Image (tube, rainbow, N blue to C red):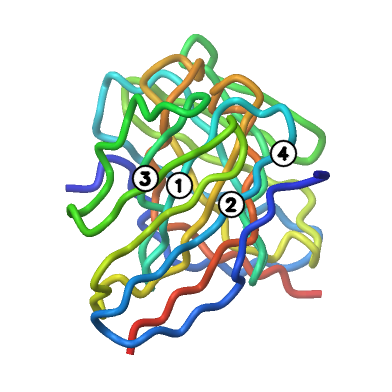
Amino acid sequence: GAGVSQSPSNKVTEKGKDVELRCDPISGHTALYWYRQSLGQGLEFLIYFQGNSAPDKSGLPSDRFSAERTGGSVSTLTIQRTQQEDSAVYLCASSPTGGVGGYTFGSGTRLTVV
Amino acid sequence: DQQVKQNSPSLSVQEGRISILNCDYTNSMFDYFLWYKKYPAEGPTFLISISSIKDKNEDGRFTVFLNKSAKHLSLHIVPSQPGDSAVYFCAASGRGGSQGNLIFGKGTKLSVKP
């Protein structure tokens, strides 16, 4: 596609439920990143994919968070047993080869845990 | 502990004047720096970058200055325009920009008044 597409754009969920966030990167981009921005904070790195493998998942805050990427394209970020502190905007970015200067971000998914 | 700091949460400037956004970092291993601009409900968009082998990079109205000894960089916008009103994020990488994740500051909200 022309840009990075994320869905849903907004998600409200009850505490304790699982959620899945989806990212469609730019076609042909091999690198994919997940970040999140909590209220009043900067962008916090979560995980980086090169192809279907994740050489850096150091930013995942707990084992409730997982992500996968299939076919070198779509990625899903799953949060199990959501907590109120998981409320944030989750941003996905892709780049052609993994170079940080080539990031293109999606518009994000605003997750609210009530 | 924040490795990239933007100590001014907001900045207000008159149209036509210069906007100066500041960023400090603590990790001497960072060797590539970027500025992103973010409008509400949109993902961040890349603005300008600089490698640690340079002390200045210019692109139209935007200039980034890097002072390695002070671990400080700044973004100058001249002349400022109302359309520049957005949140500006400073980001850093320790891999020469070749791959991997970025470390972001918390952002500075710039308001350019007509």
Check contact, mark 2 vs mark 3: CB within 8 A: no
Q: Earlier in the sequence, mark 3 or mark 4?
A: 4
Check contact, mark 1 vs mark 3: CB within 8 A: yes
Q: Earlier in the sequence, mark 1 or mark 4?
A: 4
Q: Amino acid at mark 1?
A: Trp
Check contact, mark 1 vs mark 2: CB within 8 A: yes
Name the residue that disc number 2 marks: A23
Secondary structure of residue under mark 2: strand
Mark 1 vs mark 3: give the one in front.
1
Q: Nearer the viewer, residue B25 or A15?
A: A15
Disc 2 and disc 3: Cα gap in Å? Answer: 15 Å
Secondary structure of residue under mark 1: strand
Give the tally of numbered discs: 4
Q: Quadrant of residue B40?
A: bottom right
Say which quadrant the C terminus of chain B sits in. Answer: bottom right
Q: Earlier in the sequence, mark 2 or mark 3?
A: 2
Q: Chain of mark 3?
A: A
The numbered disc on residue A34 is 1
Let me know if marks 1 and 4 both belong to one chain.
yes
Seen as rendered, the residue at the extreme top is B53
Q: Chain of mark 2?
A: A
Q: Residues within 10 Å of mark 3 (few under 14, many from 20)?
A: many
Residue A14 on image: x %, y % = 33, 87
Disc 1 and disc 4: Cα gap in Å? Answer: 14 Å
Secondary structure of residue under mark 3: strand
Mark 1 vs mark 2: give the one in front.
2
Residue A111 on image: x %, y % = 44, 75
Residue at x-position 72% and y-position 39%: A26
Check contact, mark 3 vs mark 4: CB within 8 A: no
Above or below, B27 against A66 in this view is: above
Mark 3 vs mark 4: give the one in front.
4
Disc 4 and disc 2: Cα gap in Å? Answer: 10 Å
